[in-house]
């Protein structure tokens, strides 16, 4: 029987739209302050990136740090 302490608690973090200087500090505050999951792994998110207003060097940095990148639809 699994006890409450042994049941994984999962939170999915997702962000939509552009990655740029307007939200860079938020992402640094969330992900670059040594926060870790109970198993020791760093927390990560999925970014649904739109093309317009995106700084792709920041997208590359987020990806290199283990975040997942996905395409935001263009219509």
Image (spheres, grey):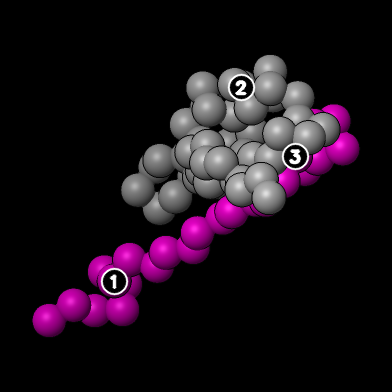
> Which residue position is annotated with label 1?
7
Residue drawn at point x = 68 percent, y = 50 percent: 75
Q: Give whichever of 1, 23 is nearer the camera.
A: 23
**Is residue 2 covered in magenta?**
yes
Q: Earlier in the sequence, mark 1 or mark 2?
A: 1
Q: Give whichever of 52, 45 is nearer the camera.
A: 52
Distance, label 2 to label 3, CA atoms, is 14 Å
Marks 2/3 in contact by CB < 8 Å: the verdict is: no
The image shows residue 19, relative to residue 48, as above or below, that is: above
Packing grade of label 1 (10 A; few <14, some 14-19, many >=20) is few
Which quadrant holds residue 22? Answer: top right
**Is residue 9 covered in magenta?**
yes
Q: Give whichever of 43, 75 is nearer the camera.
A: 75
Packing grade of label 3 (10 A; few <14, some 14-19, many >=20) is many
Q: Which stretch is magenta? A: 1-26
| Numbered circle sitting on residue 18 | 3
Helix, strand or loop for disc 2: helix
| Numbered circle sitting on residue 61 | 2
Helix, strand or loop for disc 3: loop
Mark yes or no: residue 20 visible.
Answer: yes
Residue drawn at point x = 59 percent, y = 21 percent: 60
- The image position of residue 43, as x and y in percent, is 50, 45
Looking at the image, residue 64 sits to the left or right of residue 5; the answer is: right
Distance, label 1 to label 2, CA atoms, is 32 Å
């Amino acid at each position: 029987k699994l006890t409450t302490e042994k049941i994984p608690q999962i939170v999915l973090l997702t962000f939509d739209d552009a990655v740029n200087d307007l939200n860079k500090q938020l992402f640094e505050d969330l992900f670059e302050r040594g926060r870790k999951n109970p198993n020791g792994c760093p927390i990560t998110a999925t970014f649904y990136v739109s093309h317009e207003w995106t700084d792709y060097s920041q997208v590359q940095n987020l990806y290199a740090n283990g975040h997942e990148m996905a395409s935001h639809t263009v219509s």
